[in-house]
Image (spheres, rainbow, N blue to C red):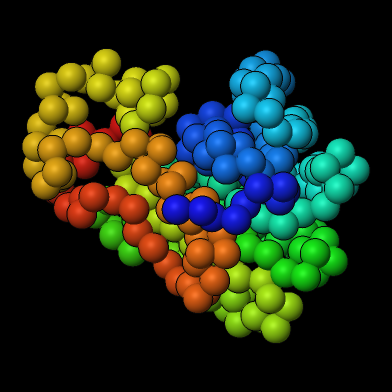
């Protein structure tokens, strides 16, 4: 299927590993110039070199998008090096703190910064450049933890992902007349080399096998490429009638009461 992405510019936050890197690879395979950002320099440099081998232009930006000045740097450098922005993928996320009585106010604030506020910030900064191109697409990345309390590590993580899901539909309504579509995908449990699930599998193979058996009708965890496929499709003109939608990518993952089998 021709997605019509050749020559466009896609900016992927957290693009040096995991889902972000696989998404950047797929954009590059479609002929899309890509900007990626990440906090660690060496993985960022390695990812950029790999992407350049696909024959597209690449901007690699070391930055933490939860810091306002660094988020501004990401947008400015993307525009300076690649000429504009057509697609924004807000892929950064995370959590801090434990259960209700363990987590501090700072843990809640940090978790919402990672999963909500940086999306608002990056979207606000990117929209003027999408408008200059006549519109574009924004895809946010949440988690099935946003509506499955049995599948969430902490309340602050699930609450922040739920907020991101709700916020996406509202932003889609605000931006629809600018021809900017905003959608969100919610991955289930996704495994890749050296990721948290991979480390958990190596450390606790029996618990991992039991968790997969109990929670996954398809008999395995998801692959980051399977999430990337959905993100890139939603970013393309082929998805021009999909807007403000929330799409789980979880292989029908089922809640399980055995929480100690999860990697947190």
Residue 24 in sight: no
Q: List x then y, in percent, for residue 256.
A: 15, 48
Q: Nearer the viewer, residue 138 or 262?
A: 138
Farthest residue, direction right: 80
Q: List x then y, in percent, for residue 85.
A: 77, 54
Q: List x then y, in percent, for residue 75.
A: 81, 48
- Image point (42%, 67%), residue name: 246
Residue 32 in sight: yes
Asked which quadrant contains residue 52, the reply is top right
- Image point (71%, 61%), residue name: 123
Q: Is residue 191 left or right of residue 26?
A: left
Quadrant position of the C terminus in the picture? top left
Q: Is residue 232 left or right of residue 7?
A: left
- Image point (90%, 43%), residue name: 80
Q: Is residue 243 left or right of residue 89?
A: left
- Image point (48%, 72%), residue name: 242
> How many numbered marks are there?
0
Q: List x then y, in percent, for residue 27.
A: 58, 42
Q: Is residue 219 above or below residue 54?
A: below
Q: Is residue 43 above or below residue 36?
A: above
Q: Nearer the viewer, residue 27 or 30?
A: 30
Q: Nearer the viewer, residue 196 or 45?
A: 45
């Amino acid at each position: 299927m021709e997605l019509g992405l050749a020559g466009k510019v896609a900016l992927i936050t957290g693009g040096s590993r995991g889902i972000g890197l696989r998404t950047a690879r797929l954009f590059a395979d479609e002929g899309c110039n890509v900007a990626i950002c990440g906090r660690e320099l060496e993985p960022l440099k390695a990812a950029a070199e790999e992407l350049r081998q696909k024959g597209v232009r690449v901007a690699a930006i070391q930055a933490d998008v939860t810091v306002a000045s660094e988020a501004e740097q990401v947008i400015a450098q993307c525009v300076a090096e690649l000429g504009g922005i057509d697609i924004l993928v807000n892929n950064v996320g995370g959590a801090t703190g434990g259960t209700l009585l363990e987590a501090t106010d700072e843990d809640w604030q940090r978790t919402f910064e990672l999963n909500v506020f940086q999306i608002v910030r990056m979207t606000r900064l990117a929209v003027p450049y999408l408008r200059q191109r006549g519109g574009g697409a924004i895809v946010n990345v949440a988690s099935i933890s946003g509506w499955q309390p049995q599948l969430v590590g902490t309340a602050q993580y699930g609450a922040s992902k739920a907020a991101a899901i709700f916020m996406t539909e509202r932003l889609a309504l605000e931006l629809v007349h600018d021809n900017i579509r905003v959608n969100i995908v919610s991955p289930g449990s996704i495994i890749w080399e050296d990721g948290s699930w991979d480390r958990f599998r190596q450390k606790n193979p029996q618990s991992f096998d039991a968790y997969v058996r109990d929670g996954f009708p398809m008999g395995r965890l998801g692959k980051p490429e399977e999430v990337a496929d959905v993100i890139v499709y939603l970013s393309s003109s082929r998805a021009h009638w999909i807007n403000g939608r929330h799409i789980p990518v979880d292989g029908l993952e089922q809640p399980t009461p055995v929480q100690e089998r999860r990697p947190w």
